[in-house]
Image (cartoon, rainbow, N blue to C red):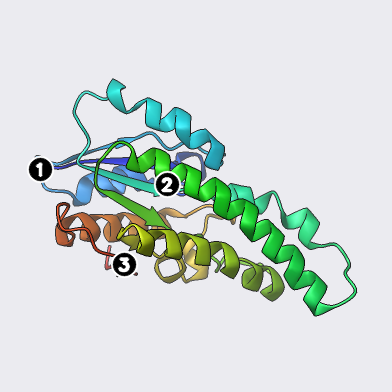
């Protein structure tokens, strides 16, 4: 029996954006073995700093967690979109701004990972997806430095990764209610990838494996 706990933001807590019963939580539970269970601590709108409160709720769960799966950081980057529209004098100047934002994101993301690792439980991280319908090519490229932080942290600590860029790669994977949220289709693909990860990844043999799209 495995108990999977989902932490983070609306990538997992997407109920307001999809029909009842098609949210990530419900679809994941339907894909698990009968004795497996999952708990949702993720909350729509959360940023990296909110993870301390989510982790603090782990002892409230009726059963100890066997896996922590976290998708967080997208809202932190979303908060920078306005600044990314600023005019600059050169490509080098723009790259310098990205480097500064990446450094702050790295500090915050590392702090979050350290909080999660302190629980001494198997942990999986998720990248930030970049195929949102209507997303400008420049903004899509600007996401790469932040995803680099996530992948480097995963490799440093030998953690598996859900690469949401590979999982949610089609327009239909995004909600028509809010295009930055997973649709029922996207949520199914995310749930399938999580189910595959916990089936295939040995919790006591940490290693970095990148999980892409799995058939829902």
CB-based contact (under 8 Å), mark 2 and mark 1: no
Q: Which residue is mark 3?
A: 211
Under tag 3, what secondary structure?
strand
- Density class for disc 3 (Cα within 10 Å; few <14, some 14-19, many ≥20) is some
Position in image of residue 161 (x %, y %): 35, 61
Can residue 178 be spotted in the picture?
Answer: no
Q: In this image, 190 relative to 82: left or right? A: left
Position in image of residue 47 (x %, y %): 56, 41
Circle nearer the N terminus (3, 1): 1
Quarter of the rendering occupied by the C terminus: bottom left
Q: In this image, 88 relative to 4: left or right? A: right
Q: Which residue is mark 2?
A: 113
Badge nearest the viewer, 3 or 1: 3
- Density class for disc 2 (Cα within 10 Å; few <14, some 14-19, many ≥20) is some
Q: Vertical placement of 200 versus 203: above or below? A: below
Q: Vertical placement of 19 versus 41: above or below? A: below
Under tag 1, what secondary structure?
loop
Q: In this image, 184 relative to 136: left or right? A: left
Gap between marks 2 and 1 measured at Cα: 30 Å
Position in image of residue 111 (x %, y %): 49, 43
């Amino acid at each position: 029996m495995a108990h999977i706990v989902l932490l983070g933001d609306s990538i997992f807590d997407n109920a307001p954006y999809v029909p009842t019963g098609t949210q990530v939580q419900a679809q994941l539970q339907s894909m698990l073995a009968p004795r497996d269970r999952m708990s949702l601590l993720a909350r729509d709108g959360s940023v990296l700093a909110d993870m301390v409160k989510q982790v603090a709720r782990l002892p409230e769960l009726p059963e100890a967690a066997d896996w922590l799966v976290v998708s967080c950081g997208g809202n932190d980057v979303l908060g920078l979109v306005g600044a990314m529209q600023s005019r600059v004098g050169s490509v080098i100047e723009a790259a310098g701004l990205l480097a500064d934002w990446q450094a702050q994101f790295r500090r915050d993301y590392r702090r979050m990972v350290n909080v999660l690792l302190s629980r001494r439980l198997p942990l999986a991280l998720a990248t930030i997806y970049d195929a949102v319908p209507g997303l400008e090519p420049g903004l899509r490229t600007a996401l790469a430095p932040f995803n680099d932080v996530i992948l480097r942290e995963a490799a440093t600590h030998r953690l598996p990764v859900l690469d949401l860029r590979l999982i949610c790669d089609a327009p239909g994977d995004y909600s028509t209610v809010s295009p930055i949220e997973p649709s029922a289709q996207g949520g199914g693909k995310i749930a399938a990838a999580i189910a595959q990860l916990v089936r295939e990844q040995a919790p006591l043999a940490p290693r970095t494996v990148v999980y892409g799209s799995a058939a829902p």
